[in-house]
Image (tube, coloured by chain):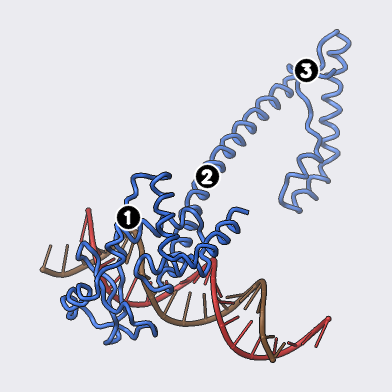
Chain colours: A blue, B red, C brown
DNA sequence: GGGTTATGCCTCCTTACATCA
DNA sequence: TGTGATGTAAGGAGGCATAAC
């Protein structure tokens, strides 16, 4: 399985740390030259992080953070937002940078689940906590599933619609054939066995009622046979081989 | 070997913040 | 500028698998 292979490769590369990243960068260049990941975001100097963090000091107070407070405050290269600590009980809100999202998306497109090695590797590359990488993947899977559900929903809606149309068309056709049969004008009419129709009926009650109507149906079949016989006698085509 | 407990990961649902129209 | 809609990071509950005891 591809996933296992990847997991295996990741494990093999774990000890190489940045080396693995470098080789993957090489791979990425080949696979998708448009994606250009600058490591600078991941290696954002602590001083810069701190100074930018100061600017955010008054933004909001934050709820108690995980044990790992190493990345208390950092900020993205676009200076928009980012990892905030939580000292005053307000939930922190992280917005990932474009680069971070890109790399996560890339990783996700290769494999939608994480193993510990990949998680750690990504967390290091992105300067995020492993927990954040994990959560991102969880949310990403949820989004994918939601999208897929929407697509499926659309598909079944259309399918239902087309089956409805088909049903109406067949009913109409049946009506026409029945009326032709009543007039005795159509030797091509083939009586559909009652049992076949019954098996399609979702209502038990109706099935029972229909059984009681079998005699009437038999009478109709008899009539049909009379029509067929007379057509045969006339050398006509009876619709069967 | 079977029961219990701890751990880790997952999905699902929800909350709350950030952003945009 | 205020507001509702939307996107999404994160929290928490509960289920499942696995390992250790």
- C-alpha span from label 3 to label 1: 75 Å
- C-alpha span from label 1 to label 2: 37 Å
The answer to whether A57 is drawn above or below residue A149 in the figure is: below
Q: Which chain carries label 3?
A: A
Question: Is disc 3 in contact with disc 1, using a CB cutoff of under 8 Å?
Answer: no
For disc 2, the marked residue is A155
Question: How far from the left and from the top, in percent, is residue A132?
Answer: 40, 71
Q: Mark 2 lies on which chain?
A: A
User: How many other residues sit within 10 Å of disc 1, few (<14), some (14-19) or many (≥20)?
Assistant: some
Q: Mark 1 lies on which chain?
A: A
Q: Nearer the viewer, residue A26 or A168?
A: A26
Q: What secondary structure is found at the residue carrying circle 1?
A: loop
Give the residue at x 47% y 56%. Answer: A144
Q: In this view, does A75 lie to the left or right of A138?
A: left
Give the residue at x 54% y 63%. Answer: A12
Q: In this view, does C7 lie to the left or right of A202?
A: left
Res A187 label: 3
The answer to whether A203 is drawn above or below residue A125 in the figure is: above
For disc 1, the marked residue is A37
Which corner quadrant of the image does residue A52 belong to?
A: bottom left
Quadrant holding the C terminus of chain A? top right
**In this view, the mark in front (1 or 2):** 1
**In this view, the mark in front (3 or 1):** 1
Q: Do labels 1 and 2 share a chain?
A: yes
Q: Nearer the viewer, residue B1 or C6?
A: B1
């Amino acid at each position: 399985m591809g996933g296992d292979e990847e997991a295996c490769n990741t494990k093999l590369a774990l000890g190489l740390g940045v080396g693995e990243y470098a080789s993957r960068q090489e791979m990425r260049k080949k696979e998708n030259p448009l994606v250009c990941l600058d490591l600078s975001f991941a290696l954002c100097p602590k001083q810069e992080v701190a100074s930018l963090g100061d600017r955010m000091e008054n933004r909001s107070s934050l709820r108690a953070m995980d044990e790992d407070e190493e990345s208390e405050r950092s900020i993205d290269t676009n200076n928009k937002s980012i990892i905030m600590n939580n000292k005053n009980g307000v939930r922190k809100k992280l917005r990932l940078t474009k680069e971070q999202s890109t790399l996560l998306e890339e990783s996700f497109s290769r494999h939608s689940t994480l193993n510990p090695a990949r998680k750690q590797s990504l967390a290091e590359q992105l300067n995020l906590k492993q927990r954040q990488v994990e959560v991102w993947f969880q949310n990403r899977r949820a989004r994918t599933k939601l999208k897929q559900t929407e697509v499926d929903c659309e598909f079944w809606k259309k399918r239902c619609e087309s089956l409805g149309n088909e049903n109406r068309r067949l009913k109409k056709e049946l009506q026409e054939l029945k009326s032709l049969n009543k007039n005795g004008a159509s030797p091509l009419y083939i009586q559909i066995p009652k049992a076949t129709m019954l098996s399609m009926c979702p209502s038990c009650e109706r099935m029972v009622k229909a059984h009681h109507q079998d005699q009437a149906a038999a009478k109709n079949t008899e009539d049909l046979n009379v029509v067929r016989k007379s057509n045969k006698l006339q050398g006509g085509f009876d619709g069967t081989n």
